[in-house]
Image (tube, rainbow, N blue to C red):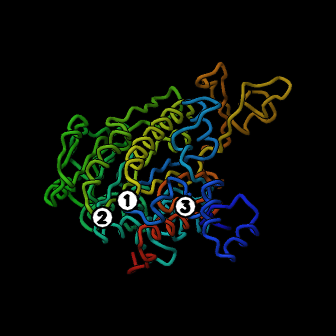
Amino acid sequence: MQRAGTRRLRRPLRVVEAFVLMGITVATVFLASVFGYGVFAQDETDSTGDQAENVIFVLGDGLGPAHRDAIQLSKVGPYDRLTMDRLPYQGMVGTNAEDPETFVTDSAAGATSLATGVKTYNDSINVDNGGDRLTSIMKQAKAQGKAIGVVTTSQVTDASPAAFGGASVPDRDAQSEIARQLIEDVKVDVILGGGEDYWYPEGNEGAYPDDPADEEVSQSNRGNLVNRARNLGYEYVSDPADLNGADSRKILGLFANEEMFEQNPEGEGDVYDPDPTLPKMTRKAISVLSKDPQGFFLFAEEEAVDEMSHNNNGRLMLKSGRAMDRTVSEAKFYADGNDETLLITTADHECGGLTVESIDDPEYPDESGGNEGNENANLSTEDGPFEVANSDYQMILDWTTTGHTGVDVPLTASGPGARNLVGNYENTEVYDVMAETLGFPKAQRTASAN
């Protein structure tokens, strides 16, 4: 693998070498001005070099290559690009886990690799295969005096925000312990999303009533963690209408029992309408974190792409994907005004084995389409048709599984260090680039988590 650390010259190398060897500075300046390369002509996004003060990391859980294509078609049509796909640097990221049973990752191992630079087993949150704790990039940022925040449409204690947020547990299901670590050990400054049930003990409903029929009940085994957060100086928000008015530098906002949506197959109680929206939570988090003079690290996740893909629910996968792209727009708006901000958007893995098709052509029939009686009917299921924006076209989404797959996922980035994310590489290298760009030493393993 070769990283794009420098720009490629567009003139024969021997010509440039000759100028350098002859020491003709005037000729170098001439080439730089005429042909647009050299030290006098860098891309605008490279103008600050490779050192960042801030990082905004937007994760689309389960967002594979076909997901991005389908979201593009549904939002801007076949000839335009999403905001996330307009970021100038692009790479492809390997997602495989180091699990004794399978190489296909879950979100815990995938996010841990992105956040710590270490491969591990599925279900692990920042714990390696030897049982040692790992230090996440955001925990390092906090130790360096930066403000940090996690924003998600999932539970704030779910796998990806837990891993980036710096918790360390051998099993991702220990969500109340994750909550405790986020506020007590790591001291994450801004925490916004769902998952109230893991912050209140049994019998204390909190702001969102228990719903045993949907297995949504308060279940903290670490006591009342909302009260604990208040005692630690957090401003607690549970009403979405109150988020804008929150004026503390430390905010905990919980806006649902579990996820901020209902993941089900289409027409079976499926709902995607988070309140507040992911873009709004991201905008609020940036406004709070950016007040820190030493910079910040924000992790923002759209979880519904994954959950809707697990249910082969194309309609709400597309809707949540469009919300994710608006979130990237919020992050880009800030990054465009602050040239010390590295913006990254990618996924932890692909979900659903998705492909995008046109309406079936009788000359080239679909291999299954879920059509009863077809000998290949059970190989995949068609979903749609869906309208293609700014056109008269329609598209079909074709799923091959309700689980995760091992395909590489796209990454796009802008800002300092982003050019080092070009190419094809493992997810652990994303951590390496972030740490180098922030000027952090590579994190070390710490005491055993067992």
Left or right, residue 51 beside residue 147: right
Residue pushed farthest bottom?
447
From the viewer's perspective, is the residue at label 3 or at label 1 nearer?
3
Quadrant, the C terminus: bottom left
* Quarter holding residue 105: bottom right
Q: Are marks 2 and 3 in contact (CB under 8 Å)?
A: no
Mark 3 crowd level (few <14, some 14–19, many ≥20, 10 Å Cα): few
Residue at 56 percent across and 57 percent down: it is 41
Residue at 13 percent across and 59 percent down: it is 231
Q: Which residue is mark 2?
A: 146
The mark that comes first in sequence, 2 or 3, is 3
Q: Are marks 2 and 1 in contact (CB under 8 Å)?
A: yes
User: SS class of the residue under badge 2?
Assistant: loop
From the viewer's perspective, is the residue at label 2 or at label 3 nearer?
3
Residue 54: image tag: 1
- Amino acid carrying label 2: it is Lys
